[in-house]
Image: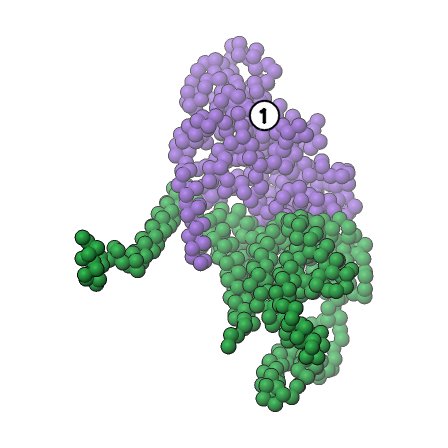
Chain colours: A green, B purple
Amino acid sequence: MKSQDARATPAAVPFWNDPKKRSLFYQFATLCLVGLLGYYLFTNTVTNLRRQNIASGFSFLQKESAFEIGESVIPYSAADSYGRALLVGALNTLKVAFVGILITTILGTVIGIARLSSNWLLAKLASVYIEAMQDIPILLHLFFWYAFFYESLPSPRQAICPGAGIYLCNRGVAFTIPEAHPAHKYMLLGFLIACVIVYFLRRWAKKRQALTGNYFPVFRVSLALLLGLPFLSWLSFGAPTALNSPKLVGFNFVGGLTVSPEFIALQLGLVLYTAAFVAEVVRAGIRSVGKGQTEAALSLGLRPIPILNLVVLPQALRVIIPPLTSQMLNLTKNSSLAVAIGFPDFVSVANTTMNQTGQAIEGVALIMAVYLLFSLSTSAFMNWYNKRVALVER
Amino acid sequence: MKRIKLVLVFLVVGFLASTHMALAGETLDAVKAKGFVTVGVNGALFGFGQPDDKGVWRGLDVDTGRAIAAAVFGDAEKVKWVPLTAVQRFTALQSAEIDVLCRNATRILTRDTALGLDFVQVNYYDGQGFLVPKKLGVKSAKELDGATICVLPGTTTEMNAADFFRTRNMKWKPVVIEQTAELAKAYFAGRCDALTSDASQLAGTRAVAPNPDDHIILPEIISKEPLAPAVRHGDSQWRDIVDYAVLAMIQAEEMGITSKNVEDMLKSADPLIQRFLGVTPGNGKALGLDEKWAYNIVKQVGNYGEIFERNVGKDTPLKLERGLNALWTKGGLMYTPPFK
């Protein structure tokens, strides 16, 4: 009887039978429940912390940290605040992630392509590398490389000198670097200017080729610009050649640039491990491009390098980018294992902070916020890049 | 997304905190209900908390934990050991994963207050020092300018060392590794010029060195480290039990009661000893324990002198002197309130 009524007047469907309104209601109810649960637990935590006399809030960030940090990219001493100590840790994590991602991408791509090589030995070596590295847990990688450093290398007083100005010892690798000079600032400026010019040059060359069909040697001109401008500014300052080389003073090397064993071991572990995964991602991407594409390009008379650059890679990148992003995020997150081998990354500094202040909840919240920030910015950048390389459907 | 994760943390921690509020008497009831005491220990520190080659836990802190079990259950083996790193230990106690922490933790003001903990009677008076290889040729900590030093994180050690070098205007570089064993390995392999920690731990580390005679502990002791068991703030009854379990061992040594002669001592005519061993009842009831609690501790675990000599004393690889840890009657700091 009711259904007959409804058929007679379709507008009179009660709102609880309207699927749109109903789903809205369910979503709202779920949101409310989650919100209430969150509110309950949050207030409960605060009350309990207060009852147990545990301090809460972020005011500790302004207090003096009173602990040292082994390496830092910004000036830091024990007299600085916890906030600054945490910033040092965050920058160290950023340094590890940035350098790690850069090297991993290059190494992974090379190995991935090598595995597809028609050279039997090269292909087999690449597959052995990938299988072996993937199967070893990352923590073991770190312990192995760290132990390798301090067990097999001599003390600073008997440091190995593999080349002029480079010293290898169990305290790290000390490099000779050019003495600080005002010219360096201008060399950097020259390089940046060159980058901008190259960007516009590429756009112009592409447009011209599309319009007229004339080819412009972008790569060679860009290289000349990128190297030439810094070189010219160096010459214009009278070509300063003073060097700052490491010297053994007291216990350790002073001067030059010293890279710590913790940093190197962490990088080696992260890069060698993640590169194996990246190699597989790259291989999958290249394999996803049909063989007919390469054959068609060959029959058009293109040479191998342009085929890779113009035909295979643009199509492969669509497949490569999303899983590559996830590998980059993995590397960033795995860098928190640094605490096991004594590299002062964000987690390590936050751990010390939590112990001295006892504010574990705030500390864990900060750790999560920092990693989330790094991960979100990485994936935002990669999503932007992915959109650029995505296939434009016509 | 960030917000959501943040909220998640609070949810989890809030849940933990809400289920484990420390109310008076609650810990003892919970311990009795489950039938054993959960004790947080070091797990990798020779002489204080480490399982031996047969898997039996040994150490001064471990015996302190046994004494608590003996007082509560009359059975020193009713303990569940939870090995903790320096970083985990206080959180484990705050979240009630353990009932008591016996893990060479230094009593300091902020831990007693802002961390929501209560420290009880000190079971070892320690101080921070430096361990260096002999071949380094360093005779004093003041010669360590520019050195690289291995440190355990999350301890007062990090702060003490920073203070020491700051006041003397000396430079140094810390290498901070979380696991004690990994840290010792790095030091032995020469990653650091020196290892800094509490003197007792340095003795323990030196004892496991490939060649212990190659390393010396420098004469400077740069801090006060009263190591004491800790409980959650707010449960006074449980705090008293843990406190008096430690004190009872010291008191027993002062009265000359050992695990060997405790049976004979039951017949002693001394009213102090009668009260202590529960022959004259009163102390047990006041603590909410069996009257035999102190008897059980001495019988099953021993007095303080016995556990000291057994774990860290002259006949052990640590070869530690009693020093500050001698009874007050022998020039040390071990002193107890009257047991009446």
The image quadrant that residue A174 belongs to is: bottom right
The one nearer the camera, B31 or A198, is: A198
Say which residue appears at 56% left-offset and 59% top-offset: A326
Q: Position of residue A40 (x, y in %)?
A: 35, 47
Q: Is residue B245 left or right of residue A16?
A: right
Q: In this rendering, is residue B318 above or below B254?
A: below
Q: Secondary structure at mark 1?
A: helix
Q: Position of residue A22 (x, y in %)?
A: 29, 56
Say which residue appears at 56% left-offset and 53% top-offset: A347
Q: Which residue is mark 1?
A: B304
Q: Position of residue A365 (x, y in %)?
A: 47, 53
Number of other residues with Cα within 10 Å of mark 1, as a class: few under 14, some 14 to 19, many 20 or more:
many
- Marker count (numbered): 1
Say which residue appears at 48% left-offset and 25% top-offset: B35
Residue B23, visible in the rendered structure? yes
Residue A95, visible in the rendered structure? no
Say which residue appears at 40% left-offset and 38% top-offset: B19
Q: In this rendering, is residue A225 above or below A36?
A: below
Q: Position of residue A270 (x, y in %)?
A: 65, 56
The amino acid marked with disc number 1 is Tyr
Chain under disc 1: B
Q: In this rendering, is residue A143 above or below A199?
A: above
Q: In this rendering, is residue A306 above or below B103?
A: below
